[in-house]
Amino acid sequence: MTHDDPEKSGTKDDEGARYPAPGVSSPPEARPDPDAKKTPRPEPVPTDLPDPLTLPQHDGEEDTAG
């Protein structure tokens, strides 16, 4: 993509640099609520997860072909 005006497109020195738009800050959910009476509870840990998968154990002996 090319721009006609080099002032608007920036220079090669800042190529890839990204800046937030003026007036944009963190979304409200990313900032703590200053009026909150208590801290938010952590989400509950699910208890219905399946057992984790395990890899077969290697017995330490060298593998030999046939």
Image (tube, rainbow, N blue to C red):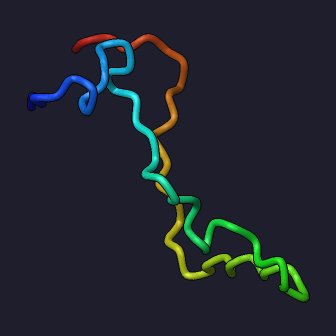
- Residue that lies at the very extreme toward the bottom in this rendered image: 37
For image coordinates 9% across by 29% down, the residue present is: 4
For image coordinates 55% across by 67% down, the residue present is: 27
For image coordinates 55% across by 81% down, the residue present is: 48
Q: Is 44 left, or right, of 63 in this rendering?
A: right
Q: How many labels sit on residues?
A: 0
**Residue 34 in the image, given as x and y percentages of width and height:** 83, 77
The residue nearer to you, when weighing 35 against 56, is 35
Q: Is 17 left, or right, of 25 in this rendering?
A: left
**Residue 1 in the image, given as x and y percentages of width and height:** 9, 31
The residue nearer to you, when weighing 66 against 26, is 26
Q: Is 8 left, or right, of 41 in this rendering?
A: left
The residue nearer to you, when weighing 8 against 41, is 8
**Location of residue 46 by image quarter:** bottom right
Q: Is residue 65 above or below residue 53?
A: above
**Residue 66 in the image, given as x and y percentages of width and height:** 22, 14
Q: Is residue 49 above or below residue 57?
A: below
Q: Is residue 25 above or below residue 8?
A: below
